[in-house]
Amino acid sequence: MATLKIRKASDIAAVIKAVREDAGLTQTELAERLVFSRDYMVDIESGKETLYVTRLFRVLHELGIGMTLDYGDGHDQS
């Protein structure tokens, strides 16, 4: 299992893209499973920051809150 310290949206985006690719899914397939548009998946995987995400990371940073993602073993493809 891999662990990654998250500092910005692009850190999360990289993990999402890598795990999706490891699962053998295209952006379109994942978007269809989640009932999202493919364009939305492109935005997520590119780390596009919305006002909400930018503010969220500012709050986390200001309060000294760290975030990590664990991924790998135990992935449930439901």
Image (tube, helix red, strand yellow):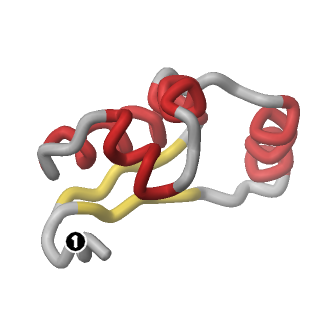
The amino acid sitting under disc 1 is: His
Identify the residue shown where x is 44% and y is 48%: 32
Q: Position of residue 9 (x, y in %)?
A: 59, 35
Quarter placement of the N terminus: bottom left
Identify the residue shown where x is 73% and y is 55%: 64
Residue under numbered circle 1: 75
Q: Position of residue 48 (x, y in %)?
A: 63, 23
Q: Can you tell which quarter of the image residue 2 is in? A: bottom left
Quarter placement of the C terminus: bottom left
Residue 77 position (above or below residue 31): below
Identify the residue shown where x is 19% and y is 39%: 21
Q: Can you tell which quarter of the image residue 55 is in? A: top right
Identify the residue shown where x is 37% and y is 35%: 28
Q: Position of residue 11 (x, y in %)?
A: 46, 35
Left or right position of 26 against 50: left
**Tag count:** 1
